[in-house]
Amino acid sequence: MDNENLNNIPEEEIKKETEEAIEEAEDTAEEAVSQEEADEEDSAETPESPEESSDSDEEEEDEDEDEEKICPGCKENTVARGHEYCRKCERKYVKTHIGFFRYVAGAIALLGSLFAFIIICISALPSLQVFEGHIYQAGRIVYSSIESFRKADEVASNVSGALQGVSFADRFLQTGSSLDNKIFKASIKFYNPLVAEQYKQYIFDSPGAAEYQKHSRAVKNNSAVFKKYEDMYHKVESIYEKIVNKEKTTPEDGKPALEELEKLRGQDGIDEQLLNLYGYDIAGMCEMGDDLIYGYLDKTYETRDKNDTDWEFLYIDAYIDSLIKRDRDDEAAEIIEELMKQDLSNEKPVKQFARICLKKNELDKAEEEINNYCANNLTIENTFSDTGYQLLIWLARVKGDYDEVEETVETAQQLYELIPEFNRQLALAYLAQDKFDEAFEQAYLADEKAYYRVSYYNDPSAMSEEIYATLYVSAFLADKCGKKDTENAEHIKDIIDSFKDRNFTSDTVRQIIEGKLDVRDAVTKGVCDLI
Amino acid sequence: MRLIYVIFKFILFPGTYIRGFWEHLTCKILHLPVESEGYLRADEACGHVEHALATTPWSAWLMATGPGFMMFNAGMAFLYAGVLNIFYMGITPYDSIGMFIFYVILIYLGVSFLCSLFPLTEDILTYWDMAYHTKKRVPVIFKILSFPLALITRIGAFCEKNCINFLLAIVFIVLHIVLML
């Protein structure tokens, strides 16, 4: 452009006029802004009426719609109403391809999830079995939880057998050491730490179990308890074994042994509770009188809190029995209640509670407690200790309902063949009816079953003092009052001879043999330790 | 919060990537324009694709819940295949290192898939507005039936945006480890 003029106006004048116009425009704009701010303040102070506001909203919307929206994709073209991109971008974006690799990734994810689903199907049944175990554990039915955990392995084998054609199935049907650990922990609770330690090698049978045991906290802790017990036994071994190895012991044998035992009290590494327990054992074996025997038991119970390890599992049953015999039923009931809360599958406290009820002639309460127990445990298949049926048989027997006893025993035996307690209870029922020969037969069967389990299943818990006692009493009474012409007559004599030198801890046995107690009273009243 | 969101999304990248893929595929099926198709990105759209909002209630519903449905099924399958074998069948590294690692990977995949379950809040809000706020023609029965899932998806999308679901995932994993011990 020419520097001289524009429309014949000198350039300097044009510049001046332009600057003035800009200044004026800026002023106007500033005024407008300040006016807007003032309006906003006013509107904030005095809210608009709804009608006014809706009117203004509509106006704004109309303005928005009228405004042309720029495409966010290309930032050039305008966007048609109801669309987010311009026609060109939209066409381009709709046509975008998913890369081949992405399809492959998606297909892998899909196939992978299908494979995972197959794994779930394969391992579902054994896992459900374990889940059932967890449910029992949460409900404090410990024995049933052990059974469920054990069966998981069996179920896995069954599924594996059913899927023989599927070669990879076996790899996903293995149970591991962590499941063994669950069984081990539950066994410590249901049986006791010493029994669990003894059967550790049978419980941990998974491929990596040997290595796993080195790292399991439960195994380490239990081994420490076992070691403590063993160490303590080694310290009293010489004193204890002298009594145990004698064929027949007298109170005179017990005195020096107890004196030696007392000398150890307070020494380093001596567990006071276990020392009292050994004292109780020695006093019991040497028949040193109830005061001394129960005295040691009381001391054992009193020292329960002073130890790191409470050996409750070793003495609590004997202690409760002693309380019942000493007519301290309320104290016994208190301990029993606590035990029943800890494990709903433990039949011992239920039976002890029922005995208290029997003693007090409150069989209704016993029946209620037994029915509660059965509700939790009767439906569970407990291979070797179906305690629910045992309690039902016991209840029918003490109520004198012998037909019910026979029926329940028959039902129970159809389900469980190897439980000696059914036969023992039936023997007691026959004793109460003066059917001594039948009683002997059942007691003998109980003894045989127990022996079979000890020999073939390595289960020493099957053989109990009560089985021996029942067999001896049955044999003694069958010999004395039974039929002499039966095939069993010779056999009965052999059995009596085999028990000749045996020391029975049962008072009831002694009293029946000595003729001080009627067998019918013995098996129907609460004080008897045969029942 | 955005940083935590992105970090977790990258840690759990398999789920993030596959979620992006399912969203992308859904957009293709519904002919929705996809502007940005990167699945692993360092922003709020990590694990999602930037796309135009759906215009019909059906496509909005599918966009909001379809990819999540696929992720849920796959995630549950992976997670439970691992959980059943480690926590129920009791497989430990001492039994078989290979199988144990395999199951741990399955659990990781399951968690990563389940942590990418929910859509962007915009997607579910689009359906929500169409179904419950505007007068779009959505059958009443569908409105009622879809409400629980729509609500869960809306809450889930909010949680995911604010990283709450990652915290839940961590709590879940820690709980299982404690249970296993």
Image (cartoon, helix red, strand yellow):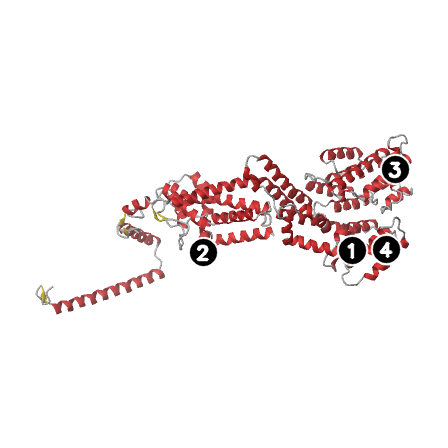
Q: Which residue is mark 3?
A: A494
Q: Chain of mark 3?
A: A
Marks 4/2: CA distance? Answer: 72 Å
Which amino acid, mark 4?
Answer: Leu
**Residue A78 at x, y = what percent?**
26, 50
**Of tags 1 and 2, which is closer to the observer?**
1
Residue nearer the viewer, B111 or B69:
B111
Specify the amino acid type for callout 3. Answer: Asp
Image quarter hosting the C terminus of chain A: top right
Measured in 3D between alpha carbons, the distance from the residue under mark 2 to the one under mark 3, in whole angstroms, is 83 Å
Label 4 Cα crowd, 10 Å radius (few <14 / some 14-19 / many 20+): some
Whichever of callouts 1 and 3 sits on the residue coming sooner in the sequence is 1
Q: CA distance from mark 4 to mark 3?
A: 35 Å
Are the numbered discs 1 and 3 placed on the same chain, yes or no?
A: yes
Residue count near mark 3 (Cα–Cα under 10 Å), binned few <14, some 14–19, many ≥20: few
Q: Nearer the viewer, mark 4 or mark 3?
A: 3
For residue A531, say whether it is visible.
no
- The residue identified by callout 1 is A233
Q: Please name the amino acid that badge 2 sits on.
A: Ile
Q: Depth check: give the residue in front, A85 or A503.
A: A503
Q: Locate residue A374, reporting x and y percent.
A: 71, 40
